[in-house]
Amino acid sequence: MIGTYFKERMITINKDKYYILKHKNGKCYLIPLTIKKSKCKKRKKTCLKKSKCTKCQQKCLKKCLKTCKKKSLKDYKKIAIEVPKPQGVKNVPTHIHFYLHKSFTKEQENRIRRGISLLLDRWYTHHNQKWDGGTNAGTSELAACTDRYATKKFKPVWAKSSVPNAIAATNLAMNQFTQLIRDNGFKKSPPAIIDPRSSTTIYAPTASTKRRVPLSLQINPKQLDSQALTDLKLSGSMFHAWLHRAGWTDPKVTSYFISECPMCIMRNLNSKQPAFPDSGNYKFFD
Ligand SMILES: [Zn+2]
């Protein structure tokens, strides 16, 4: 299904909104890319010549196109990563999929794959430990580690009720990660795009909703080549970015959930040591 999009030009406006650009009778039309059939009735055709793009703060849609139309799927390679099946979690897809920009080298691709797989392992282990042989009341090592250090901003932007502590926040984050994995694997969210970026390490904007959020990332290829960014630090940096996709916000410093939970992953769930200050880890967060 995704493959057919290669024939048309796909663009993105405002990060998460994807559109297909079509030509008909000398006019250009944008068709919002929605994957689920039930949404088809909402498809709207917009003539570029007539309409203003409200999604881009009233700027002309043509202007948007100029900056966005580089994003043709021809520039991307589709990769699939196997998803392990944790106990007590139903409806898990066999794979998640990404469109990886072709400018990444094979070595860089392998590092990205390893970072994602390490995170999926962490997610898998968390759920198994929480399932605790069927009680579903266990505390995972990740939650226990985070609980020792995180004291601030447990609540994601979409949550209506408060989140009492770091254990509850970790459980909520991992459940939301399950949602993101399902939406990706069952093609309910827009394609997850991995683009290069020239600064920092790994960036993703904070998502305001729970559903259909793509696991898109921007990754600095230079950092992938650097030995300072170990596999553990890479997966922690990626997890920080995906916590933004899951709705958590910065600051990316000591005591805050969005920092402490990924830093536990970076320390392989070990305790903090004075010789290795937090700043050596959160410098890899965006
Ligand atoms: Zn951040």
Image: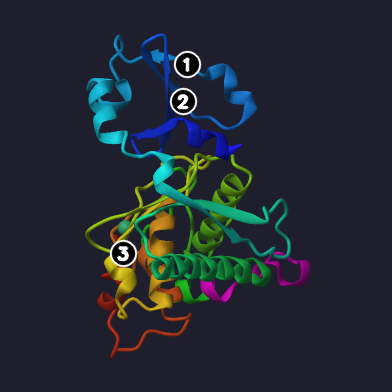
Which of label 3 and label 1 is nearer to you?
3
The location of residue 193, given as percent across then percent down, is 43, 48
According to the image, label 1 marks what residue?
44
Q: Amino acid at mark 3?
A: Pro
* Mark-to-mark CA distance, 3 and 1: 37 Å
Q: Is residue 165 left or right of residue 103?
A: right
- Ligand 1 image-quadrant field: bottom left
**On the image, which quarter does residue 279 sit in?**
bottom left
* Mark-to-mark CA distance, 2 and 3: 30 Å
Residue 145 lies in the magenta-colored region = no
Q: Is residue 145 left or right of residue 283?
A: right
User: Which residue reaches farthest right?
Assistant: 134
The location of residue 242, given as percent across then percent down, is 43, 56
Which of these two is toward me, 196 or 231? 196
**On the image, which quarter does residue 67 sit in?**
top left
The location of residue 6, given as percent across then percent down, is 49, 37
According to the image, label 2 marks what residue?
32
Label 3: which secondary element:
helix
**Image quadrant containing the N terminus:** top right
Q: Amino acid at mark 1?
A: Lys
Q: Is residue 191 left or right of residue 253?
A: right
The segment highlighted magenta reads: 130-143
Q: Are marks 1 and 2 in contact (CB under 8 Å)?
A: yes
According to the image, label 3 marks what residue?
221
| Label 3 vs 1, first from the N-terminus | 1
